[in-house]
Amino acid sequence: MRTPERGNGGFWSMLRQGGVPSAISSVMGGTSAQQMAFIRSLMREQRRPETLHTPLHKLKTVIFDLETTGFHVQQGDEILSIGALKADGEYIMEKEQFYTLVQAKRPVPGHITELTGITQPMIDQAPPLISGLHDFMNFIGDRVLVAHASAHDKSFLNAALWKTSKVNLSHRLIDTMMIARWLDPNRQSYSLDSLLSGKGIPIEGRHHALEDAKMTAQLWTSYLKEIAESRMADTLGDLYACLSHA
């Protein structure tokens, strides 16, 4: 992702401080400008140190998943859909769900349509990327994020956030794949399908962002129960420390 030209330093400085010049607001449209300002404001409030002291059984999370045009964000692949739901500790809030398609400039490849069911006409009629990101960030609030193989999702979110709002994701993030490697270091496969099967979690609707998020949520809460029973970690900080030494 290319950094801004030096000649625009004053503009980008104002954006970094959360402001949106009125002229830019008129060019972008009031709604887009407000969405950008909201996203930037939310990012400044994240990573408070006290969150690390939160007991895992009280941790408020959003478990999410993305579908994309491919796996190579640096080569231009983009987000197609975002799915998520909330959990409070081990309790999955089934009614607190989020799903949206978003517009992408890169055409939807045929094999992605076969895999996800997402077609080009669906993307053509989807909300703009910044609108989808705004709604997703509003859904997250200050909760901790959870994803499986999160490096992929984080890289795509960062690219989208930088493209639309010139910020990077600042929320704390937990990777269920890393937890699986820590709890079961001798396992042959850490794919989502393998881990779900190992836990006896039904696999339904794979490669749909919301359905994958739902299954990842079940995996996450099963790990929380396992960690609580073994007393290996009590707080978010404890969990991060364990994962860093795994």
Image (spheres, rainbow, N blue to C red):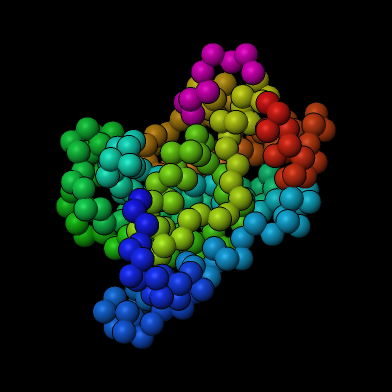
Residue 59 in the magenta stretch? The answer is no
Does residue 215 appear in this view? no
The outermost residue toward the bottom is: 22
Q: Nearer the viewer, residue 87 or 238?
A: 238
Which residue: 33% across, 63% down?
5
Which residue: 66% across, 47% down?
91
- Taken as a whole, is the magenta stretch helix, strand or loop? loop
Which residue: 53% across, 23% down?
190
- x and y, in percent, of residue 109 in the image: 19, 38
**Quarter the C terminus occupies:** top right
The quadrant where residue 3 appears: bottom left
The quadrant where residue 226 appears: top right
The outermost residue toward the right is: 231
Q: Which residues are magenta?
A: 185-193
- x and y, in percent, of residue 94 in the image: 55, 51
- x and y, in percent, of residue 159 in the image: 38, 51
Q: Nearer the viewer, residue 23 or 28?
A: 23
Which residue: 61% across, 24% down?
181
Q: Residue 82, relative to residue 228: is it above or below?
A: below
Q: Is residue 98 left or right of 124 when viewed as pictured?
A: right
Q: Residue 34, relative to residue 45: is it above or below?
A: below
- x and y, in percent, of residue 9 in the image: 40, 70
Numbered circles on residues, count: 0
Q: Is residue 23 left or right of 213 when viewed as pictured?
A: left
